[in-house]
Image: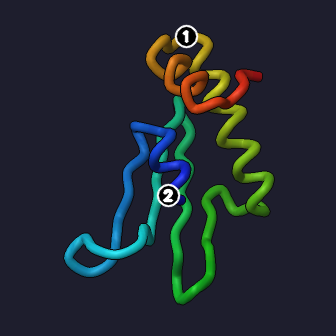
Amino acid sequence: MDYLTERIPAAKIKRGLMNRGPITELGVDVGDRHFRARWVKEELILEPAVELTAWLDLLLAHLSDVAGSDADLRRMMTRSGWALR
């Protein structure tokens, strides 16, 4: 989650008590779609509820789609080393 937080400026995060410690929740709105990942009792819960690799693939696909019309997002993706699809 730290990696995605560094690479996606629009990502909203939550940390532990008093906003310290590791990231416990990550939320990203991409176009009309919301992606969420959170740790609950050492289990990673993803929304939409799919396997982790599929979740990441969906996130990157939606980021690529929106980046086609959003210059700032396109710049962020290319600076992060992500290829547009």
Picture coordinates of residue 4, whole percent (x, y):
54, 49
Q: Nearer the viewer, residue 4 or 57?
A: 4
Position of 8 relative to 43 (above/below): above
Picture coordinates of residue 43, whole percent (x, y):
62, 82
Q: Amino acid at mark 1?
A: Ser
Compared across the picture, whether 48 is left or right of 7 comes to: right
Circle 2: element type: helix
Picture coordinates of residue 38, whole percent (x, y):
52, 69
| Number of residue marks | 2
What residue sits 69% from the left and 62% below the top?
49
Callout in the foreground (1, 2): 2
Q: Nearer the viewer, residue 73 or 62?
A: 73
Quarter where residue 58 is shown:
top right
Q: Tell me, for residue 69, which label it has, or none.
A: 1
Picture coordinates of residue 31, whole percent (x, y):
52, 29
What residue sits 72% from the left and 33% below the top?
61
Q: Tell me, for residue 2, which label it has, or none.
A: 2
Circle 1: element type: loop
Compared across the picture, whether 13 is left or right of 20 comes to: right
Question: How would you rate the neighbour count of disc 2 (Cα within 10 Å): few for under 14, some for 14-19, many for 20 or more?
Answer: few
